Image (cartoon, rainbow, N blue to C red):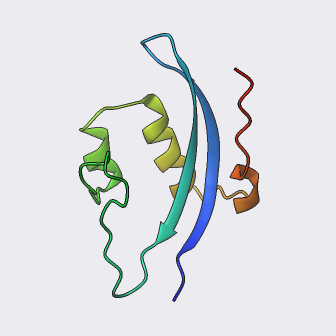
Amino acid sequence: MAWALTVAAIYLVRAANGNDYARVCFAGSVPDGADPAPQDPVILDCLWLTRDEAARRPRSSAVLACLDDHLGGRRLPLGCATHLLEDR
């Protein structure tokens, strides 16, 4: 079974450090037998949290917005998150 991904929303975030970020909320399911471990060496851990558990571990305000949008049924076509344009 292939990984099934959707996009719940795209957020533009102005962080406390003054930087602007685009956060894409991907949602999906892990196929049976797949190892849900980080594939990127800079990601230290892969946690599976409920919304309430995530709320007790504050990060960006976009994290809870992302969870709420996904749990509320928001979905966008996966293709809306395919291009990164770098003009700097």
Name the residue rendered at 33%, 87% in the picture: 33
Pick whichever, 80 or 84, lies toward us: 84
Q: Please say whether residue 77 is visible from this viewpoint.
A: no
Pick whichever, 36 or 75, lies toward us: 36
Task: Give residue 84's position: percent from left, percent from top.
Answer: 70, 41
Task: Give residue 79's position: percent from left, percent from top.
Answer: 75, 59
Task: Give residue 53's position: percent from left, percent from top.
Answer: 25, 48
Task: Give residue 60's position: percent from left, percent from top.
Answer: 41, 30
Location of the C terminus by quadrant is top right
Name the residue rendered at 26%, 56% in the picture: 47
Tell me if residue 10 comes above or below residue 37 in the rendering: above
Q: Residue furthest top?
A: 18
Tell me if residue 3 comes above or below residue 71 in the rendering: below
Pick whichever, 34 or 51, lies toward us: 34
Name the residue rendered at 62%, 63% in the picture: 6
Q: Is residue 87 left or right of residue 32?
A: right
Tell me if residue 80 comes above or below residue 61 in the rendering: below
Name the residue rendered at 64%, 55% in the picture: 74
